[in-house]
Amino acid sequence: MSDREEKLTASHWGVGVATVVEDKIISVDGHSRDPAGSEINANIPGSIHGKARVLRPAVRKSWLEGRPNTVPRGRDVFVEVSWDRALDLVAQELGRVRKTHGIKAIFAGSYGWSSAGRFHHAQSQLKRFLNTQGGFVRSEGNYSYNAALGLMPYIVGPYRQHVAQATRWSVIAKHTDLVVLFGGMALRNTQVSDGGVAKHRMAGNLQACADAGVGFVNISPLRSDAADALNAEWAPIQPGSDTALMMGLAHTLIKENLVDDGFLQTYTTGFEQLRGYLVGDDDGAPKDAEWAASLTGMSADNIRTLARRMAGGRTMISVAAGVQRTDYGEQPMWMAIALAAMLGQIGLPGGGYTVGYGVNANIGNIERPFRWGTMAQGVNPVSDFIPVAMISEMLLNPRGRYEYHGESRVFPDAKLVWWAGGNPFHHHQDLNRLHAAFQRPETVIVNEMNWTATARHADIVLPVTSAQERTDFGAGKSDNALVPMPRLIPPQGDARDEYDIYADLAERLGNRDAFTEGKTSHDWLEEIWETTRSRADDAGIDLPDLPDFLAGDVIDLPDPSPDQVFLADFRADPIKHALPTPSGKIELFSETIAGFDLEDCKGHPCWYPPRDRTADRDAAFPLAMLSGQPKTRLHSQLDNGAYSLSHKISGREPVLIHPDDAKDRGIEDGSIVELFNTRGRCLAGAKVTDEVAKGCVFLWTGAWYDPDFESRDARDRHGNPNVLTHDLRSSSLTQSPAAHSAMVQLRKFTGKIPAVTVHEPPPFEEEA
């Protein structure tokens, strides 16, 4: 290797140009062709070469010594062992659990974003391996937009398919008068996209809308949830009250004869049932503007004015994914569809609704022209699963019953948990409860590159390579580019590629060829690339062979649908292009959901008050806590990198607090504060700003969980909001996470400020 080289890499936040000197990554910058490259790239060098790197296989000491319950997981010391010893232990545990408890005792949910790359995908590799070993219990859904995944098929159709068909922002710039942003649309979220994004288009497309005179209303407690360039009207309603506002708007449309009855009759079913609820026929309580004002904090006059404005021109209703990550999160999506249907603009250029604009970089901006090649996972012989956000419930309540999509299901009794490519101690709610739940399995195995809280809760930790320590290619699930990912540096310490780990494990278990099919990593990569080339050829696109591709630059491919309008075909011909719902129409009342007879999700959109507010009758916890994606990292990935660290306050995650709320508590900008409620408490650094609404605080997600088990409620030292969120989920229909429904109190921390320890490795000892 020469003294200094520049090579491409790819991440979920975009293409990176890495500078490598003597087998060390010095810096990673954005690609010159990316109009808004992400600064998250700057986290890569410090995390890969950081102190928290898992350098050798490690085993929890008390588990290794046969006394696993003497020291709780998350508090124990570790013993570093050889790869042979570690793999022997894993193989023995897999065999023991299968023989003693059966194959359904193995849970490998492994939810998480992992790394970009078509071949070295953590969950795919693990699932393929376990499928060759008899199978495993899996998880279903995701933490990002699970309520949408669960609800939309009943109402309008499959969410993943429809979000790929979202109306393009270029169409909005040409045709739309007003965009109403329920939950805003934060540019920080649009840095990332599943599998990668070669060009960040969102800022430019929004600027084009602003230049064209499109109006925006930002309905969010955070002013910065709409870019400054939009000059959006800010309407900071009470968190969790979006459904009430939508109902107040809908009631105004009804009372002022602004409803498109022809559209409702032709394209929807069930409006009469919803109408009866809105005007109060069902319960004697009209959901009018005054009613909505009492719940949202937005004046009744402003609600009526907004309704008239929406009806007076071409309007796009946008619902951010965060809005459905709340108590009863199905309701605002369903009501947004109803509101759009009442306006009658669904299927028109620049009108209608979209759930999920801004959830990643590409929705409404670009799509892939064809499906990329992938490594087959095989068939899982086990059909059982759990909803993704019920991991604690499963571990704490084995063989217990729960409701899901109208069915009464039974949790498995998981004895072995294997996690790869994710960090549940980031994305799950009520981390003290999750800590307790992680004490229940007999064995926990974690593949990791860093000593995250999840790794510290494992019995066996397997050190794995980063994306920059192996060869692959990047291709986002919704992107139109292919990115070479040559290996930049050798693996750190004894880290290994997961494919090679599983191949050696399969050999110990007697079926190596079932996993590898006699192929090396390079053989698989060649096969996946050739599949991609073949599909490109079918689309009239010529791609180079793998060596030439890996030695070259990013390849941009055509945009398959630059002028798409969501549900335009359905509007043009609702018979020929009927929706995949029971009626073939938009279901504003669902006979199917009504038939489930659920208390928390009826047959049409309903208003339910948030749980924390209802339970806290004495207002002991008066601040609504929001916890969104930070601009400094993807969730918790590479939290110990330079860019992430640069925005912390005294080493802790910043919490945004309104000046009036800060003054009432004697808090100044930069103060260390303690947030707390009945579930837990954490320290954070105060950022006093009027960009957050009074009565709300905003604590970014993703600070690595750093509990102080000697303090009250095992107070987190670092600022992880999920020690404060509840684990009750949205409803029994979809069992989705409801993280944005927590109420907290906040005070200036006056004790001795503890050091943040989670970016250091855990303690190690020699085996007794």
Image (cartoon, grey):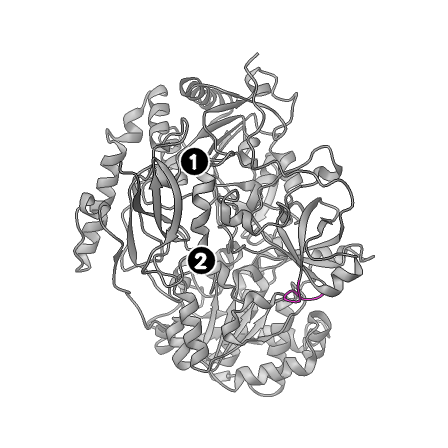
Magenta residues, start to end: 689-694
Which one is in front, 523 or 340?
523
Residue 396 visible:
no
Please give the residue where the numbered disc 1 appears in the rendered image: 382
For marks 1 and 2 on the same chain, the one whose residue lies earlier in the sequence: 2
For the point 37% across and 21% down, the residue is: 509
Count of numbered labels shown in the rendering: 2
Q: Is residue 596 above or below residue 378?
A: below
Along the horizontal axis of the image, is 727 left or right of 702?
right
Quarter of the image containing the N terminus? top left
Q: Is residue 472 magenta?
A: no
Along the horizontal axis of the image, is 750 left or right of 77?
right
Task: Decide whether the magenta segment is chiefly helix, strand or loop.
Answer: loop
Q: Quadrant of residue 760?
A: top right
The local crowd at label 1, few if under 14, some if 14 to 19, many if 20 or more residues have their Cα within 10 Å, is some
Q: How far separated are the C-alphas under marks 1 and 2? A: 37 Å
Of helix, strand and loop, which one carries label 2? helix
Q: Quadrant of residue 753?
A: top right
Numbered circle sitting on residue 521 = none
Which one is in front, 249 or 762?
762
Q: Position of residue 661 (x, y in %)?
A: 75, 62
Q: Is residue 693 magenta?
A: yes
Residue 293 visible:
yes
Q: Is residue 451 above or below residue 95?
A: below
Please give the residue where the numbered disc 2 appears in the rendered image: 191
Pointers 1 and 2 in contact (C-beta within 8 Å): no
Q: Is residue 370 above or below residue 566?
A: above
Residue that lies at the very extreme toward the right in this rendered image: 618
Q: Position of residue 563 (x, y in %)?
A: 32, 73
Which one is in front, 637 or 67?
637
